[in-house]
Every structure is written in C-alpha cells, then in structure tokens.
Amino acid sequence: MRLKVTRRGFLSVRTGVVFLFILVWLLPGYALVQSGTGFIAGLVTDEHGQPLAEVKIRLYHLESKTEIKIRTNNKGEWSAEITPRGTWYLDFEKTGYEPRRVCVQVAGKQARPSWLETRLKNLEGLVMTEEIIQALEKANTLFSQGSLEEAFLIYQNILTESPDSYAINYYLGNCYLEKENYDQAIDCYQKVIDKNPQFGPGLISLGNCYLKKKEIEKAIACYQRLDINRIEDPQLLYQIGIVFFNRWLFSPALKYFQKAAKLDTLYDEAWFGAGACLEKQEKWLQALHFYNKALKINTENAEYWKSVAHAEFKVGNTVSSIDAYEEASKLDPTDKEIWLNWSFIYFEQGDYEKAIDTLLNGFKDVPDDAEFFYRMTVYLIEGGRFKEAFNYLENALILDFDGHAALFDFFPKIETQKALFKIIEQFRKDNS
C-alpha cells in the first residue's frame, strides 16, 4: 500500500510565500465554530500583544473553493461572514512576520459568532526599516502576480543594501523554486537555515526542493528537524505524513496523520492514513477504529470500505468483513483485490461454492486477470471440480505463465504440488 496525494493535497494559489504543496510554518491556532453559517471576528497582534494593522487575511473553504480576502483595521481587528459548512483555512500574512494558518471547522446549522486571537512572530534575520518593508511588500506583490524576475531583482537589491537581512535569501529561494532551479533554491534556503536552524519555512521549502529532485532521504531529514508541536496546518501534517509513510517510517507518519485528523476532524484522508500506519504495524483493532472514522466521513470511497473489510477480517469479524467487501464492490467493481479478499473468506471457511460464486461475479468486471484465473483454479480444485479447474489453469498460464508460483501457497502437500507441477510442465512443453 502506498498513500498518494489526494484531492485535498494541493492548492494552486500563488502567494508571496512558497509552500510545500501549500505548506506553511505555523504557530498554534485552532478554533471550532459550531455553525452552518458563521460570523467570525478576531484580533491580530505581535508577540508582545500589540495590535497589527493591515495584516492580509485569506479565508479559504476547500470543498466549495470559496475565497474571502480581508485586512485588519488600525486596531488589528477583522471580521468576516462565512457560509459553507466544513473546513476553512485562515492564512495571516504581514511583511516582516512569519505567516500563520488557523484551521476552522463549520459544522452546525445555526450561526454563532466566534472570536479568534492570533499572534504573529517576527521574521528573524530581517532589518525592519520603512524602506525595506515597502520594498519587500512590493516584491511580494510582484511574486504573487507571477512577475518573478522583477521580484527577484528587488529581493536581491534589499540584500545588497542590507547584508544583515539574511532572511531575504528565503524569498530569493522561493523565486528559484518557482522557476524550478532547485539547486540555487537549496543554496538560498541553506543560508537562512545556517543562521536560524529552526526556521520552519526554510526547512519545509528545502525539503520540497529535495522532493522535487527525488532526493527523498534528504527531504525527510529536513522534515525530521521540524517541531510537530508548532505545526497547526492539517494539510502540511498530512503531506509530511505521506512522505514518511511511503518510506516505511510508520511511527512518525502516524503522529502526523493523527495530529492532522485532530485539527481537522472532517479530514477523512488523515484518519485513513493513521489507519494505514497501524495496519502496517499489524495493530488491527486500532487500524479499524481509524478506518471507520474515515468511512463515517466519506461513505462513497471504495478504498475505505475495503480497508475496513480487511481489518474486520483480521480481528475475526467475518460477517462485518463480508458486508464491507460487498459495499466496496458496488463502488469499485474493477478492484480485483476486493473480489480476491472477499472470496478468500469463504474459501478459508471451507465454503468453496460461495468462494467460486463470489469470484465469478468479479470476473464480470475483471475478465482477463491472470490472478483471478489462478485463484479460481484453487477454489475449483478444493471444490472437487477438477475438469473446470484445468480449464482455468490453462487460461491462467496463457495470460501469465510465471504467475503459477502463487498456486503452491494454497497447496502445502507435496503430492498436490507434484501433480500441479507435472501439468504445468506439460503445458510449457506443448506451448514452447
């Protein structure tokens, strides 16, 4: 099993800050709004509690692609009315400060005001003069508009005029990353990290570059330096979890998936990812818990039903497993694993006729798969239907001769193996 980037994995939104799959570095911030239509207001301050004016706030609803853009007033206050239910992301950005994202869930039916207080951290390695702030704001605007060369020149000029502003290398790295000049981007990000080893945006973007270059181990090394306690973006957590999972690092992957699901309780992919990690660790009862969480959110996903079915089987709930496989087959009848696993339950129970009938139903949508023919051969032999078994075996050998090795896993007796080997060898000779 490999986890893949899902429909929620990427957002193609160009901003003044480059993200890993839209990854941002965030300080803690989470709120739950029990409403279907909500009025949200809040206050943005610096680390010392001083209100920040003109903070750019972008509210984004993933499912409906609804976007709202506002700014704080002179008192650092803001407000917005949001209507679609589900998960909203609020991005806070101001020149000279680290960006922050707050995850908000709208789950109820009646609007209820919610007040959010957000603190932004100063961006280290930046000399905050009025000229630099104005130049940086202009460059960030150009970058967000796609004018990379113009933005790059302004960033470069800032660094030339103010060598102590080493954080500007981060912005230069973003330009290189956007242009797919990964080596130059890595060099820029590394300059920032050398000065500030725990600079989250730099570590994330550096890891992104290594991913793009398919240097996965170096990317993982960057992510391992992140403090998970300071990351409050469910998408970021989920995507890093995928990277760990696909390198068989299931324990750290589980932590990222679990936190993503905790922050966004409607994030079915995160619940599923946690279940997949536990399955790999053969913790079936715990895996079933997380799979059911994902399934409760999205009942139209065949992969969720299949995973629930497999976990139910592993914990001994065969009836529930069969029911789940039936639901999975309705949603994706072309998934051969559903039919093979479902029919195997009957086979293991000694009900060979039901195993045969189930697999025959699968043949309607998967007609030319060698594994189906080999498996049917097994069921027919155990059911005493040897003539039919030979016909299926012959077709299986035509489709994939080397696949016959799987047969011997079902027949541990030497006598049976010898008989099968003799038939297979004769077929090979007759068709060589």
Image (tube, helix red, strand yellow):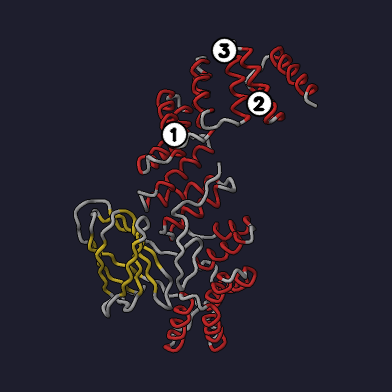
Amino acid type, residue under disc 1 in the picture: Ala
Question: Can you identify the residue that label 1 sits on?
Answer: 328
Q: Is residue 34 left or right of residue 417?
A: left
Mark 1 is surrounded, within 10 Å at the Cα level, by few (under 14), some (14 to 19) or many (20 or more) other residues, namely many
Amino acid type, residue under disc 2 in the picture: Ala
Label drawn at residue 239: none
Q: Looking at the image, which is closer to me, 209 or 353? A: 353
Mark 3 is surrounded, within 10 Å at the Cα level, by few (under 14), some (14 to 19) or many (20 or more) other residues, namely some
Q: Are the residues tagged 3 and 2 within 8 Å (C-beta)?
A: no
Q: Quadrant of the N terminus?
A: top right
Q: Are the residues tagged 2 and 1 within 8 Å (C-beta)?
A: no
**Element type where label 2 sits in the image:** helix
First-in-chain label (1 vs 3):
1
Up/down of 100 relative to 33, above or below: below
Q: Looking at the image, which is closer to me, 383 or 49? A: 383
C-alpha separation, residue under disc 1 versus residue under disc 3: 26 Å
Amino acid type, residue under disc 3 in the picture: Gly
First-in-chain label (2 vs 1):
1
First-in-chain label (3 vs 2):
3
- Residue 88 image offset from top left, x and y in percent: 34, 59
Question: Can you identify the residue that label 3 sits on?
Answer: 383
| Residue at 45% in and 71% down | 15
| Residue at 52% in and 23% down | 360
- Residue 277 image offset from top left, x and y in percent: 50, 42
- Residue 107 image offset from top left, x and y in percent: 27, 51
Question: Can you identify the residue that label 2 sits on?
Answer: 396
C-alpha separation, residue under disc 3 versus residue under disc 2: 18 Å
Q: Which residue sits furthest top? A: 384
**Element type where label 3 sits in the image:** loop
